[in-house]
Image: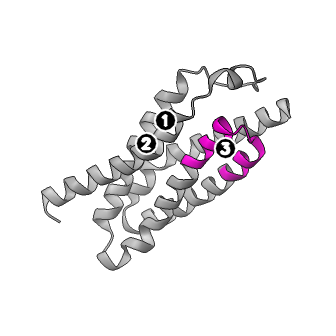
Amino acid sequence: MTPTRSALVLLGWLALVTLTALTGIFTPPGDWYAGLAKPPLNPPNLAFPIAWTTLYLLMAVAAWRATLAAAPAERWHTLWPFAAQLAANGLWSILFFGLHWMGLALLDLLLLWGLIVLTIRRFAAVSPMAAWLLAPYLAWVSFAAYLNAAIWWLNG
């Protein structure tokens, strides 16, 4: 792949990941979330945009590396779980913050977790580095599942 095409692929993944991030921007926590009881280990509000910005950048770079490493015939097989997890990721903000459906948001997080694991497996087959770049994301989503479940329990 030429350097120009490689840069375009990276820009494409950054754009797609940014679209996913926008669901969080357009569904801010607001007063509803501020008024909820929170579990132990709930991080300060500032931690969330820092963590998610970092994770979204790592996700885009991972997808870029996997795209470059996968043979053209393998790309769909390698990348569809990544695209699916982006959709589940964006849906969570809508369900939790937008609609206040904490239980359904938790189910979405479980689906997201499974899709991330599948993505890591697919990426590992073509680029171990791409797979490792998603490890912090899997850890954060695991922690987010704890927070989602605990908030639902405490406020249900």
Q: Which quarter of the image is occupied by the N terminus?
A: bottom left
Q: Which residues are magenta?
A: 90-108
Instruction: Name the amino acid, label 3.
Output: Leu
Q: Residue at x 74, y 20 (%)?
A: 35
The residue carrying mark 3 is 95
The alpha-carbon separation of the residues under discs 1 and 3 comes to: 17 Å
Q: Secondary structure at mark 2?
A: helix
Colour scheme shown: one colour
Instruction: Name the amino acid, label 2.
Output: Tyr
Q: Position of residue 29 (x, y in %)?
A: 62, 28
Residue farthest to the bottom, as pictured: 73
Label 1 close to label 2 by CB (< 8 Å): yes
Residue 111 is marked as: none
With 61 as the anchor, is 77 left or right in this view?
right
The residue carrying mark 2 is 56
Q: Residue at x 37, y 71 (%)?
A: 75
Residue 52 is marked as: 1
Q: Secondary structure at mark 1?
A: helix
The alpha-carbon separation of the residues under discs 1 and 2 comes to: 6 Å
